[in-house]
Image: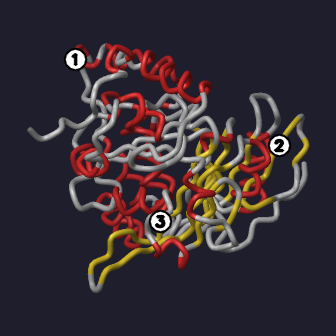
Amino acid sequence: METLDIRKGEQVALVGPNASGKSRLAAAFAGRSGAKYITFRDSYGAYGDRNFFMQQRWNFFTLEDDPPSAGEQLRKEAAACREPEAAAKRLRELTALFALAPVLDKPLVTLSSGELRKFQLTRALLAGPEILVIDNPYIGLDPRTRSALTELLGRLAAGTTLVLVLSRAAEIPPFITHVIPVSDGETGAKMPREAYLDAVLPPAVIRLRDVTIRYGERVILSRLDWTVRAGEHWALTGANGSGKSTLLSLICADNPRAYACDIELFGRRRGSGETIWDIKRNIGYVSPELHRAFQVDAPALDIVASGLFDTEGLYRHPSDGQYACARRWMEEFGIGATSASAWWPVPS
């Protein structure tokens, strides 16, 4: 088994298919380095045996003895640490960090999968390990709980070196800095996260690195990293004024501040000689603002066809093929019968 080379400040993912040997590698690394090792195949506290745990869970209300609560178990383990006072203090800090207060009074056998993840992480961190190895942290979690766990691990990564064992590239969280691929028991070379994803996933069509936009004292976007790959579909959500339109303006070549940011579109760095029209040619954009500003008296077919030339209104004569394309899309959206109608009513 090869020795992993993980440097201080790195957050590493071991990635490979099932039965590739990554869990054995992680366990061997933890044993040799003194790292704390968590496997979520067994997230059942002190019970250990899964069958026994599940029997306790389903028969909870018929048990004669009260099973221990999560808080009791954690306090017991903190007291057993080599430095119990430091462990007790760390338990208070972790309770706040992981928002564990509502969980502490619950019996262990009643905790959900997400709550058990938090419980296991807290147990592992009581002694303050410098390195934490986590095997398949996301297995069995719903999307909302996965997102919450990623945020939690990201906060944890600020002071602890994490080594995650994952099966798919899509599971690699944003805080991971390096990836080590594992296949058939062999480890590949450690590489930066972005380089690994570029090698195994579809090409990036949008990439923003550490983008900050501020107007005076008001920060609109703060150190944003975002990559959109070919074939992906995203939704940007947020309240009015949260920065959604500003972000889109950076992508759609409308915001001059884009030239001061690290932004790549379609594999090319902004400001490297491309024109606005080179970018707009590859992007279709629809917004309420565009709709309100588009006050042109013309047939609907001409308005649709103007999208081929990225103009507000049609100032050149489309070919028969271009008109056919416009009609096809109008039919697709169920408005083919309106092709001869005026887009904007002429004032009487």
Identity of the residue furthest to the bottom in this view: 216
Q: Is residue 24 visible?
A: yes
Left or right: residue 86 compared with residue 103: right
- Total labels: the figure holds 3
Instruction: Identify residue for label 2.
Output: 182
Q: Which mark is residue 61?
A: 1
Q: Mark 1 is on which residue type?
A: Phe
Question: Measured from the top left, where is residue 188 in percent x and y?
Answer: 88, 50
What residue is rendered at 60% in x and 41% in y? 171
Q: Are marks 1 and 2 in contact (CB under 8 Å)?
A: no
Q: CA distance from mark 1 to mark 2?
A: 45 Å
Q: Nearer the viewer, residue 330 or 241?
A: 330
Residue 326's place in the image compared with 147, above or below, is: above
Q: Are marks 3 and 2 in contact (CB under 8 Å)?
A: no
Left or right: residue 342 compared with residue 154: left
Q: Which mark is residue 275?
A: none
What residue is rendered at 47% in x and 74% in y? 256
Which mark sits nearer the N-terminus, 3 or 2? 2
Bin the neighbour count of mark 1 within 10 Å (Cα to Cα): few under 14, some 14-19, many 20 and up: few
